[in-house]
């Protein structure tokens, strides 16, 4: 287990003022705040995609970065098929049996029928579900979800 996550005096430009917190292992931690409050920036700092202007972000365990995944509010799709978007993430992670795992992840989000479609022509909701499949396929210990239901209809959200 890689938690706890510790932020000690972390700030980022003018967006995040010095902040210290510790998140322990558990089922879920939710960060709530108004639009523009810095929630997305905070998650990017915790995930390691941004370096803090000051302070330190640390995880227990040396392999923490490899066991995390993040789904962005606006997913980034590679110029590949939907299936290959999931498969690529598994290849980069060195996952075994990547084809099977990618197929299972696509089925889990109800996109098996779109596996061979170019990911960039999918609807916003389909792209969001594909981003979720890509993250889940990695079986991360920590999954950062930045407004993951923003483009989904109520059925897909459930």
Image: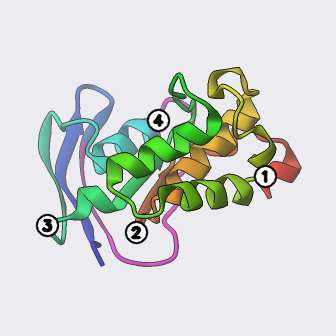
**What is the distance, in whole Å, between disc 3 and disc 1 at their CAs?**
35 Å
Name the residue rendered at 20%, 46% in the picture: 10
Tell which circle, 3 or 2, labels the residue nearer the N-terminal end: 3
Question: Residue 41 location in percent, x, y?
Answer: 37, 36
Instruction: Please tell me whether mark 3 sits on a helix, a strand or a loop.
Output: loop
Q: What residue range appears in magenta?
A: 18-37
The nearer-to-camera label among 1 and 2 is: 1
> Quadrant where the N terminus lies?
bottom left
**What is the distance, in whole Å, between disc 4 and disc 2 at their CAs?**
26 Å
Res 121 seen here: yes
Instruction: Please tell me whether mark 1 sits on a helix, a strand or a loop.
Output: loop
Magenta region, mostly helix, strand or loop?
loop
In the rendered structure, find residue 141 and report the number of the disc placed on it.
2
In the rendered structure, find residue 121 and report the number of the disc placed on it.
none
**What is the distance, in whole Å, between disc 1 and disc 2 at their CAs?**
23 Å
56 relative to 142, above or below: above
Residue that carries the numbered disc 1 in the rendered image: 110
Residue that carries the numbered disc 3 in the rendered image: 62
Residue that carries the numbered disc 4 in the rendered image: 37
Front residue of this view, candidates 33 and 99: 99
Q: Are marks 4 and 2 in contact (CB under 8 Å)?
A: no
């Amino acid at each position: 287990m890689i938690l706890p996550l510790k932020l000690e005096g972390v700030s980022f430009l003018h967006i995040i003022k010095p902040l210290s917190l510790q998140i322990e292992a558990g089922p879920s931690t939710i960060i709530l705040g108004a639009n523009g409050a810095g929630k997305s920036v905070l998650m990017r700092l915790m995930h390691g995609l941004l370096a803090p202007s000051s302070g330190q972000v640390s995880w227990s365990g040396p392999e923490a970065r490899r066991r995390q995944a993040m789904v962005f509010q606006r997913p980034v799709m590679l110029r590949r098929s939907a299936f290959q978007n999931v498969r690529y993430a598994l290849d980069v992670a060195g996952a075994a049996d990547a084809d099977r795992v990618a197929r299972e992840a696509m089925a889990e989000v109800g996109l098996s029928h779109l596996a061979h479609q170019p990911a960039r022509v999918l609807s916003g909701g389909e792209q969001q579900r594909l981003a979720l499949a890509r993250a889940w396929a990695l079986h991360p210990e920590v999954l950062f979800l930045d407004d993951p239901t923003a483009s989904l209809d109520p059925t897909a959200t459930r």
